[in-house]
Amino acid sequence: MTESEFRLLVARLERECDVAPARYRAKVTAVACLGYAYALGTLGLALGGLLAGLALLANHHAYLGIKLTIAFAVLSTCIARALWVRLEPPKGRRLSPREAPHLWRLIEKLRAKQVGPQIHEIIIDEAFNAAIVQTPRLGIFGWYRNTLIIGLPLMLALAPKELAAVVAHEYGHLTGAHGKGGAWIYRIRLVWLRLATTFEDSEGWFDKLFTRFFRWYIPWFSAYSFVLARQQEYEADRAAARVVGRSTLASALVAASVKGRFMSEKFWPGLLAQADHQPQPGFLPHAAIRTALRVAGDSGDFKTWMWSALARLTSYDDTHPSLRDRLEALGVKKPAVPTHPEHSAAQVLLRDALPRITQDLDAAWLRQVSADWSARHAHVQAAQQDVDQLGPRAARLEVEELSRYALALLTLDRADEALPHLRAAAEHSRGNAETAIAAARLLAEHNEEAAVRYFELAMDRDGDLIPEATQEVLAMYERIGNEALIQVWQERVERVCAP
């Protein structure tokens, strides 16, 4: 299912839900059961064949009995193996109750108030997020292990009550906020989405044949359950508000939105940009987040970003409603600009363990980025050398040197200077695919249809680029809204990406 098809289907289902919500929920439940019906039905048929083979053996029909028994034993084993998918447990630094007793105590208090299932482990990582991940120990058949994952940056950004509000929202998905049927659908929706990659990566001929149903079913079920999942976000908000209060939840939602934008648009890009000039990071991230947030708050950026967040509309890119819609649903009309808490949730809930956790996450981050950092630094230095050497005679360069010069400018984030040189190099008879695709992407960023010519040049020169470039052209026309060309390029995508 393509992105445009998904959006059209979800839009139709939203209208259907508005007209007859009870009937729509019943339909989603039926769609949810279909996946289990297929899984159990095929397994039941295989086991039935196995029993029939054993019955023939018991009645002295040896030849036919042996053939049936072996065939259906193999089939049953293959089906059971496909269904008993073991998902990787969440990764991150685990926090024991002994190391972080105050955090565990908070979770137990929220659990008691919301009457929810046990949290088996808490993991802290570097994401600006919090989530409860349910890992099924029996594949699609459940028996869940519940893991609360909290990002240290989120804990450093929020006050303790705000963090409690965020966790209470996540807990609301697992409790009675959605009703028993709604909670079940929420849970299996996440499980099916996590299993999608596993089914896509099936290797054997039988696995591909058996999981072909799921490769069709999971996107279809995702679309049908999307509207319900969005409603469940509002329900989880209401459940959290009953525990921590509307104003605290509203404060947490605004702070998470605004400070999360700072982290993704300013903090991390600013840190990684140092690789252009420094062979090693000038500072480690988690040790610097609180200071960076304080400076950003004092600068007045938080107010600007809050109003920008409130201006955004709910879209089909995510089941979460927009910030404005969530606040309106809570009855909060005048949200406050986020402030910098005197004591962060990390300081209050992690206490003596915070320095050690910070050091561990920073060390893990440094190990993770070290090779890419060094490669980026070397690449930028080489690009600067090319620009210095080739720039003075740019008008007289041969196509090979012109390509090098244009790509070097692009590496140095001088896209406006690079674009005319990229186009000239790409259009040359000896031009290469690299300059063509680079020119195409710069033009596509501004939805300029001239990009298509360069995508075509890139595809002509390097056949391996065809699937990726075709999808990029389709994405551009979807942004532009040209329905006729969307259809044309959708057909091309289906042809070149067909298995």
Image (cartoon, grey):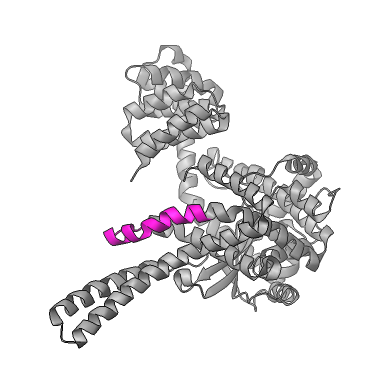
Residue range (magenta) = 201-221
Q: Residue furthest left?
A: 63
Left or right: 269 as drawn, with respect to 177: left
Type of secondary structure dominating the magenta stretch:
helix
Left or right: 318 as drawn, with respect to 160: left
Left or right: 101 as drawn, with respect to 135: right
The answer to whether residue 164 is above or below residue 467 is: below
Q: Quadrant of residue 460?
A: top left
**Of residues 361 and 387, the one drawn nearer to the viewer in this rendering:** 361
Pinpoint residue 4: horizontal percent, then vertical percent: 52, 40
Pinpoint residue 205: horizontal percent, then vertical percent: 27, 58
Pinpoint residue 50: horizontal percent, then vertical percent: 27, 77
Residue 413 shows in this picture: yes
Q: Quadrant of residue 57?
A: bottom left
Q: Kindly identify the residue that appears in the image at 45 percent across and 56 percent down.
A: 217
- Is residue 215 highlighted in magenta? yes
Residue 80 shows in this picture: no
The answer to whether residue 74 is above or below residue 479 is: below
**Of residues 51 and 428, the one drawn nearer to the viewer in this rendering:** 51
**Of residues 4 and 66, the one drawn nearer to the viewer in this rendering:** 66
Q: Kindly identify the residue that appears in the image at 53 percent across and 21 percent down.
A: 417
Q: Kindly identify the residue that appears in the image at 62 percent across and 62 percent down.
A: 131
Q: Kindly identify the residue that appears in the image at 56 percent across and 68 percent down.
A: 134
- Is residue 342 highlighted in magenta? no
Pinpoint residue 353: horizontal percent, then vertical percent: 67, 70
The total number of labels drawn is 0
Q: Residue furthest top?
A: 396
